[in-house]
Amino acid sequence: MSFLSTRATKATDEDTMKLARVLGYLKTVQEKKLALKLTGVLMVDCYMDAAFASHEDSKSQMGVVIFIGRAMVFRALRKQKCITKSPMESELVV
């Protein structure tokens, strides 16, 4: 979905096929529910990272994922809004 959202204004036939595949998957799992089981101490883990100058306009890409126990509850990938001068600086912008 993150990739497809970046292609919304200039989608290709291949992007349309990818969207159809995602929608087909969502249709098959719409009745499924997420069940979080408590096994001992409930831990919240958050991981963040950045990829330096990974876009054509020299902007970096950042990502974050949050787990509660062993279940992933949040994930985000975003292009950073500013151009950084080093990999370390792109990590700080996250």
Image (cartoon, grey):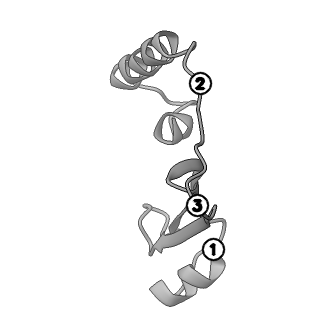
Q: Residue at x 58, y 60 (%)?
A: 40
Q: Which residue is mark 2?
A: 33
Q: Which residue is mark 1?
A: 94
Dot placed on the residue nearer the N-terminal end, 3 or 2: 2
Please tell me in which quadrant of the rendered image residue 32 appears.
Answer: top right
Q: Is residue 4 above or below residue 45?
A: above
Secondary structure beneath label 1: loop
Dot placed on the residue nearer the N-terminal end, 1 or 3: 3
Residue 87's spot in the image, x, y percent?
Answer: 46, 84
Residue at the far front in the pictured view? 40
Residue 62's spot in the image, x, y percent?
Answer: 54, 65
The mark closer to the camera, 2 or 1, is: 2
Q: Within 10 Å of the Cα at label 1, are there few (<14), some (14-19), or many (20+) other Cα atoms?
A: some
Q: CA distance from mark 2 to mark 1?
A: 31 Å
The mark closer to the camera, 3 or 2, is: 3
Secondary structure beneath label 2: loop
Indicate left or right for 74 with 25 as reference: right
Q: Which amino acid, mark 3?
A: Gly
Indicate left or right for 32 with 87 as reference: right
